Image (cartoon, coloured by chain):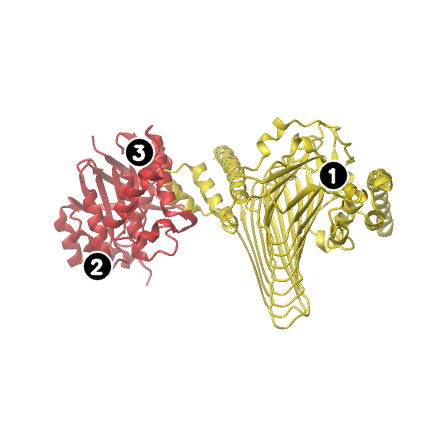
């Protein structure tokens, strides 16, 4: 009996996998065919490797330790497709709400395709090269290549460990290419806006971003994922950030897609000697979100701050109900690798989970054997606003050096009722008081950002999201009270 | 019309009846002191007046300015003019002290249909009041009560009182844990707030505070009821003789 059941189970898995892969295979064939005409051989090879890797492994299951808390069945069975360039028209007016005030420039990608007519590249500061990655590679063919793409693209993001990176490598069509010249300091942030706009179609995109920050450069980059409609989209983004000696880079990831969307984003940071990188993840939207942040401190004296805030709520209201009856699911997978001595890493992630939301924090720190005098710290703090919200938090330290300092800690709590009462007793309405307390918790994350237009932008988004959440929690609380009262009366 | 009228108030916490029929009338301009042994219900009375929902009122009524106080949320009571100086002021990391107080003032102003104060209007007043309470200006931008000393926390309560200008101020054991200098400063702050439009309910275990804030009436709360009422001389008598009968009764009630 047991064996039969098991065999049937296997069969079913096989069938689903074939179904899953065939959709992506079609996409791969199309992208590959386009590439044969215009892409250099090394890139074609890279795609092929990516596809080989993905097709061999398929989507991970929850048996995979790195995916233990995140079930991808809904993602795997949704028949996503590519969108052709210009298939879904987007007007500048539709993007008005998504600008970053004070940005140096804005690159807009719609369903994975660069949209120059929606982008704003006017007045680029000196020493900054900004363009679409696909265009940069086209230029390469014509011999006016921005140098460095081949040396960097695909050299850091780890396809063998992560199938989503492999899938992105096989299927990416475009993304941003940034190069900040040696010694150049950019005052204003660079805004990369990745828009999903599929009308009724379920679109998948695989944005690929490459940032090369030369020695002693300084810049802030905002990578921002939004959706214009309510349809489910699947964004599988990979960003490689190569940071030269003494460079100081802030990277902001903003996830504010609709609640039907799937977003897997992987940020791979390669840090040279004394490079200083801040990664700020602000995860406010999306139905199923996986946020991979993977810095490798590969030069002495490098420092990184891995800072994040994730806010989840709600039951899923996707029209086709792909994610079942659960709320937002936000999975943060941190892998901080110390490869050289005297490096310093700080991870701080705060989570706020309401209603049926579920969060995951997986904080892995690997200290390689040469990385003496490593100082690594990790903190994950969580607020659960309902009995149905859930967080799984898991530290994982792998230390192969003997003279290191590594600490980790996690907390899980609720809104403090005495604090709430104190605020209300001074005249502040309950919803506002909740909002203030949520904001105070979130502000720990904001306080770790340097003062900048990017921080102001993050602050505004967080304020708006928390306002929404506080009102929703308040409404839910008053509903419960009514229900309880009724039950009580019936019993009485 | 009395400012506060408490009629036969019964209240429980977790099913235990703490207040067992409290009657009290407070007029504007008066200072009433409520004294009593530990566990007699003093803080419960304060919490009920501030509308803390962990305390269930099982019967009786409270009229504040002619309105039913028991119908009000904490924020509504505060906007109507009830202020509780907490026995244990709460620390709120991440919310600035000045920002918090301005939010509170503006919430109350909004309730009364008044314009909100901006930082420019607010700050000079705030700084001036801090100075009167001999508070370090650095506390202004620190998180609410976070890392404050006991005395700083109590002064911060009085600072809020002086800015929010309530009709009824309830001081819940504001004197406990204060050294004599801090006590004097706190009392000065309170005395400066005395006015014909404002009443005080000073809850204390000790007579000490009443050396500085002279009450018009003193009430003794024992086992959830007001057992005696009198003038300021009653406080002195209690200081001398203790709560006597009540404490004795309590001790007898304890199993041997």
Which residue in the protein does label 3 denote?
B80
Which chain comes out red in the rendered image? B
Residue mark closest to the camera, 2 vs 3: 2
Dot 2 and dot 1 within a common chain: no
Give whichever of A16, A449 is nearer the camera. Answer: A449
Are the residues flagged by discs 3 and 1 in contact, CB closer than 8 Å? Answer: no
Q: Residue A197: x, y in percent? A: 69, 31
Report how far apart the C-alphas of labels 2 and 3 lie in the structure.
Answer: 33 Å
Position of residue A115 in the picture relative to residue A352 (left or right): right
Q: Judging from the image, what secondary structure is the residue with disc 2 in?
A: helix
Image quarter (top left, top right, bottom left or bottom right) of the C terminus of chain B: bottom left
Label at residue B180: 2
Q: Which chain is yellow?
A: A
Q: Position of residue B14 (x, y in %)?
A: 41, 46
Q: Quarter holding the N terminus of chain B?
A: top left
Q: Chain of mark 1?
A: A
Q: Nearer the viewer, mark 3 or mark 1?
A: 1
Residue A447's disc number = none
Which mark is in front, 2 or 1?
A: 1
Residue A205, label in figure: 1
Helix or strand or loop: what does disc 3 sit on?
Answer: helix
Dividing the picture into quarters, in which one does residue A28 lie?
Answer: top right
């Amino acid at each position: 009996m047991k064996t039969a059941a098991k065999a049937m189970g296997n069969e079913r898995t096989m069938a689903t996998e074939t179904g899953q892969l065939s959709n992506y295979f079609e996409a791969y064939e199309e992208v590959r065919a386009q590439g044969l005409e215009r892409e250099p051989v090394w890139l074609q090879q890279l795609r092929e490797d990516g596809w080989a890797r993905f097709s061999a492994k398929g989507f991970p299951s929850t048996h995979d330790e790195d995916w233990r808390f995140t079930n991808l069945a809904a993602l795997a069975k949704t028949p996503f497709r590519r969108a052709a360039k210009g298939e879904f028209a987007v007007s500048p007016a539709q993007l008005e709400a998504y600008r970053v005030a004070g940005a140096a420039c804005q690159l807009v990608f719609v369903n994975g395709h660069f949209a120059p007519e929606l982008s704003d590249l006017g007045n680029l500061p000196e020493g900054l090269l900004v363009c679409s990655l696909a265009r940069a590679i086209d230029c390469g063919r014509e011999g006016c290549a921005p140098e460095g793409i081949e040396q960097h693209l695909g050299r850091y993001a780890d396809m063998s460990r992560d199938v989503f990176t492999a899938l992105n490598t096989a299927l990416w069509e475009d993304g941003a290419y940034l190069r900040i010249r040696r010694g150049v300091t950019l005052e204003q942030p660079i805004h990369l806006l990745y828009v999903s706009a599929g009308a009724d179609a379920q679109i998948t995109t695989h944005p690929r971003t490459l940032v090369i920050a030369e020695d002693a450069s300084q810049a802030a980059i905002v990578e921002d994922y939004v959706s214009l409609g309510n349809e489910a989209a699947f964004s599988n983004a990979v960003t490689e950030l190569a940071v030269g000696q003494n460079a100081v880079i802030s990277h902001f990831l903003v996830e504010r897609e609709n609640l039907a969307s799937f977003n897997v984003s992987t940020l791979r940071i390669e840090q040279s000697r004394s490079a200083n990188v801040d990664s700020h993840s602000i995860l406010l939207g999306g139905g199923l979100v996986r946020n991979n942040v993977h810095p490798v401190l590969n030069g002495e004296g490098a420092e990184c701050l891995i800072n994040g805030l994730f806010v989840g709520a709600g039951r899923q209201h996707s029209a086709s109900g792909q994610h079942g009856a659960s709320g937002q699911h936000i999975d943060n997978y941190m892998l901080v690798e110390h490869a050289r001595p005297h490096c310093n890493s700080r991870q701080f992630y705060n989570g706020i989970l309401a209603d049926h939301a579920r969060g995951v924090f997986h904080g892995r720190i690997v200290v390689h054997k040469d990385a003496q005098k490593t100082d690594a710290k990790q903190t994950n703090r969580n607020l659960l606003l309902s009995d149905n919200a859930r967080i799984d938090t898991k530290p994982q330290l792998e230390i192969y050096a003997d003279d290191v300092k590594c600490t980790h800690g996690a907390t899980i709590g609720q809104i403090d009722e005495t604090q709430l009462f104190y605020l209300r007793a001074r005249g502040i309405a309950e919803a506002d008081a909740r909002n203030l307390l949520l904001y105070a918790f979130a502000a720990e994350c904001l306080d770790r950002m340097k003062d900048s237009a990017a921080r102001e932008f993050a602050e505004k988004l967080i304020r708006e999201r928390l306002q929404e959440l506080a009102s929703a929690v308040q409404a839910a609380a008053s509903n419960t009270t009514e229900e309880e009262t009724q039950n009580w009366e019936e019993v009485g | 019309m009395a400012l506060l009228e408490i009629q036969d108030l019964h209240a429980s916490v977790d099913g235990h009846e703490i207040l067992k029929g409290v009657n009290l009338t407070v007029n504007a301009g008066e200072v009433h002191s409520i004294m009593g042994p530990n566990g007699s219900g003093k803080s419960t009375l304060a919490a009920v007046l501030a509308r803390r929902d962990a305390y269930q009122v099982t019967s009786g009524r409270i009229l504040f300015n002619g309105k039913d106080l028991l119908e009000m949320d904490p924020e509504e009571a505060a906007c109507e003019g009830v202020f509780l100086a907490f026995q244990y002021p709460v620390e709120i990391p991440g919310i600035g002290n000045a920002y918090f107080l301005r939010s509170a003032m503006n919430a109350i102003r909004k309730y009364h249909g008044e314009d909100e104060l901006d930082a420019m209007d607010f700050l000079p007043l705030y700084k001036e009041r801090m100075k009167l309470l001999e508070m370090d200006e650095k506390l202004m931008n620190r998180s609410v009560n976070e890392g404050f000393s006991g005395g700083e926390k109590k002064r911060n309560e009085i600072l809020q009182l002086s800015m929010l200008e309530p009709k009824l101020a309830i001081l819940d054991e504001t004197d406990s844990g204060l050294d004599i200098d801090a006590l004097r400063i706190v009392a000065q702050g309170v005395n400066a707030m005395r006015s014909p439009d404002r009443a005080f309910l000073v809850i204390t275990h000790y007579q000490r505070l009443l050396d500085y804030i002279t009450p018009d009436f003193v009430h003794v709360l024992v086992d959830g009821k007001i057992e005696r009422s009198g003038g300021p001389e009653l406080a002195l008598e209690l200081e001398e003789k203790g709560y006597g009968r009540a404490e004795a009764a309590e001790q007898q009630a304890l199993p041997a």
